[in-house]
């Protein structure tokens, strides 16, 4: 009898682990928030300036949160001639990094990480004109925990 109960319990756990909700929750990691539809429920939960030592403020960085998808990602608004790398981090040690090119009206975003109940934050580094003469800048949001 004990073996039968154990087999039923293991079977139930396997069904739960492979349920659409479990698969759906994990499937957003490292995906584009706008192509996935997660951007439709997005709001900025933290923001900061992107600052160059030489040129001062050159843009804004935002940590975004999707209530529908339970994910965070980082967005930036900066000059159209800038290239860079946008990152999102979670307190449990996960990270995603996305390299962007010039254009897109200076609006760029990275991929998502599931972060329900976990602190997250974002960072960006940008450069223009090859980064010569101090033509580079950085920005980091504070942590958002929820």
Image (cartoon, helix red, strand yellow):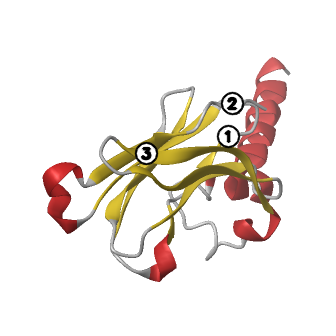
Describe the element under mark 3 as helix, strand or loop.
strand
Element carrying mark 2: loop
Please give the residue where the numbered disc 1 appears in the rendered image: 115
The residue depicted at 62 percent of the width and 66 percent of the height is: 33
- Point out which mark residue 61 bears: none
97 relative to 3 in the view: left or right: left
Identity of the residue drawn at 61% across and 32% down: 142
Q: State how far apart marks 3 and 2 are (Cα).
A: 27 Å
- Of residues 67 and 77, which is closer to you in this image? 77
Category of crowding for the residue at label 3, using alpha-carbon neighbours closer than 10 angstroms: few (below 14), some (14–19), many (at least 20) = some
**Mark 1, mark 3: which one is toward the viewer?**
3
Q: Determine which residue is flagged by label 3.
A: 51
C-alpha separation, residue under disc 1 versus residue under disc 3: 27 Å
Q: Pick the quarter of the image with the N terminus.
A: top right
Q: Place residue 6 in its image quadrant.
A: top right
- Judging by the rendered image, the residue that carries numbered circle 2 is 118
First in residue order: circle 3 vs circle 2: 3
């Amino acid at each position: 009898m004990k073996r039968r109960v154990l087999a039923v319990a293991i079977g139930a756990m396997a069904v739960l682990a492979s349920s659409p909700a479990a698969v759906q929750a994990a499937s957003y990691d490292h995906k584009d928030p706008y192509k996935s539809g997660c951007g439709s429920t997005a709001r900025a939960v933290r923001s900061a300036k992107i600052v160059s030592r030489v040129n001062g403020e050159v843009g804004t960085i935002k940590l975004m949160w999707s209530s529908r998808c339970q994910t965070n990602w980082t967005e930036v608004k900066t000059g159209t001639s800038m290239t860079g790398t946008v990152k999102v981090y979670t307190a449990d040690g996960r990270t995603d990094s996305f390299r962007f090119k010039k254009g897109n009206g200076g609006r760029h975003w990275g991929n998502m990480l599931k972060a329900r109940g976990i602190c997250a934050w974002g960072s960006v580094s940008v450069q223009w004109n090859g980064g010569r003469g101090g033509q580079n800048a950085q920005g980091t949001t504070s942590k958002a925990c929820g």
